[in-house]
Image: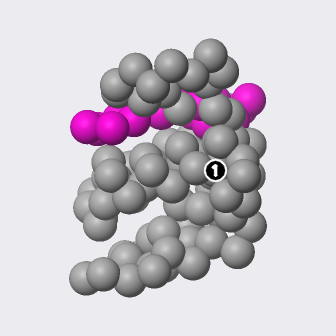
Amino acid sequence: KNQAFNWPEYDESDPGHAALMGFLALDVQHDPKYINEIIAALGDIKMGKIEQWQGGGNAYFCELSLQGAQFETAYDVGEDEIPLVTLSDFEQAVLAWRRDCEIT
């Protein structure tokens, strides 16, 4: 299924948003188990059950905490700053990704 990702808050000039899009497209893909694992981890972090969650794939490493989502590339691109996305933006993007993948 090749469907355009619909996340209205996406800001292409924000390095964190770009990293999040890359993480979803390249690492999470349309894997319902992985998407639901991320959504469960978000809930656990917001409720204080866990302090952080880590995930990754071939392109990105993601660490979630109450401070937000931090992304590192699995390859060196010479970036000094690790992109950070707020937990709220991360959640909105993942839920939009799940809707676009038609996963419930």
**Where's residue 48, x and y in %?**
67, 32
Q: Judging from the image, what secondary structure is the residue with disc 1 in?
A: helix
Query: Residue, x 66% and y 21% (percent of image)?
Result: 81
Front-most of 6 and 15? Answer: 15
Query: Residue, x 64% and y 32% (percent of image)?
Result: 83
45 left or right of 1 in image: right
Front-most of 81 and 65? Answer: 81
19 left or right of 29 in image: right
**Where's residue 2, x and y in %?**
30, 81
Query: Residue, x 43% and y 47% (percent of image)?
Result: 23
71 left or right of 102 in image: right
**Where's residue 61, x and y in %?**
41, 30
The quarter holding residue 84 reads top right
Q: Which residue is mark 1?
A: 17
**Where's residue 75, x and y in %?**
34, 25
Quadrant containing the N terminus in the rendered view = bottom left
Q: Is residue 63 above or below residue 23?
A: above
103 left or right of 20 in image: left
Determine if residue 30 is in view. Answer: yes
Quadrant containing the C terminus in the rendered view = bottom left
The boundaries of the magenta stretch are 51-70
- Confirm whether the magenta stretch covers residue 60: yes
> Chief secondary structure of the magenta span?
strand
Determine if residue 50 is in view. Answer: no
Query: Residue, x 72% and y 47% (percent of image)?
Result: 14
